[in-house]
Image (cartoon, grey):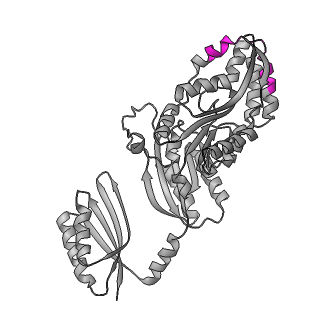
Amino acid sequence: MREIILINITGKDKPGLTYSLTQILAQYEITILDIGQAVIHDYLSLGMLIEIPSRHSSSSILKDLVFQAHKLGIQIQFSPIDMENYAGWMAKNGHEKLIITILGRTLTAEQLSGVTAVIAESRLNIDIITNLSGSIPLDHSELHPRACIKLTVSGRIDDPDHLRWQLLEIAEKTGIDISFHVDNIYRHARKLIVFDMDSTLIQCEVIDELAKHAGVGEQVSRITESAMNGEIDFKDSFTRRVGLLKGLDESVLAEVAKTLELTEGAERVVSTLKKLGFKIGIISGGFDYFGKYLQSKLGLDYVFTNGLEIKEGIITGNVSGEIIDGLRKAEILKTIAIVENINLQQTIAVGDGSNDLPMISVSGLGIAFHAKPIVRKKAKQSISSVGLDGLLYLMGISEREIGQP
């Protein structure tokens, strides 16, 4: 009669350890049904679910394994698994996997406890925990520290919206970002990422900076804030703001461009994704002059922005061409996906304002970045605690992989 046994091995890791054990199993023609291993600071945890053929005695195999473990200085435990339990494991293994990513400047036990409490309450099981950010310097010398772990979770979710709401509450209470999404094939096949420009890829709202030069800074800032919060229609607000720039000299555009500061992590995320073969673009309600400036600076593939009408070196206060509002942003993203011959699920969209929500919602991975509260609540994923390169972690890319040439 065949037997199924779960083997758990713990102890100090060393080269050749797994080979020393599996060569014993090979002698007995063992079938490995499942296997998993993790090493944390040179301490190994290895699990193997094995099937022993009926022609071999389990006592002989286990005796040889115990002897080898003693020689290696590790601990080994055996648990027999009956067919009913194995069938239950198989059924459970068929459930969809979920990815919960916890991201912040630092990670505390309180934050992790809150997240795992929600997971337990939802009757989900944590299968794998992966540290994406690597070791954290104890002297806190890093300028922009980041801590990120990824939880691979299995089980059936009865109310995904409720789970997401619980995680959002923890995020707001403890000052971290928590991403939650289904682990599917598209997660590993992203091809295109688009960014909003103002307050996303760069740290300011360009139209506000231009308004200061025109002497209408306060008026424009108030309208901008209302538009980003979704309190007034974007097209209407944009037309009103541009109208207030009438008479401004064209030379001011170059002055403002020189002062633009990229958002923390912007160059890092762009350079990393370019290495991975991503197409990268800007879809923004901002102005074409600054979009082209950033395209040249960062080497972007696409830029879609609003045209600022200029005649005889003077800003007229009008927009040239169709205004890019929220709905237009989503349409442009869909068009780029068609041109690149990729599925929308393979796209990523990042933005901060309510006018970014349409493209965030249609993309495969939509992220509200340091967004207004209304945007954070409506977007499924958000980043508010770290820089723009935090989205690399949400994509499942580890610090070790980011650092590779």
- Label the magenta part by its dominant secondary structure: helix
Asked whether residue 251 is drawn in magenta, I would say: yes
Indicate the quadrant where residue 25 lies. Answer: bottom left
Q: Which quadrant, please, contains the N terminus?
A: bottom left
Q: Residue at x 66, y 13 (%)?
A: 252
Position of residue 380 relative to residue 242, above or below, is: below
How far across and how far down the image is residue 191, in percent? 55, 46
Rendered location of residue 154, percent (x, y): 52, 64
Tell whether 183 sits left or right of 374.
left
Identify which residue is drawn at 58% across, 41% down: 193
Q: Going 65% across and 46% down the picture, which residue do you hit?
A: 338
Q: Residue furthest bottom?
A: 1
- Using the image as rendered, state which of residue 202 and residue 319 is in the foreground: 319
Q: Position of residue 379 (x, y in %)?
A: 66, 46
**Figure check: 352 above or below 342:** above
- Give the percent coordinates (x, y) of residue 59: 25, 83
Q: Which residues are magenta?
A: 239-256
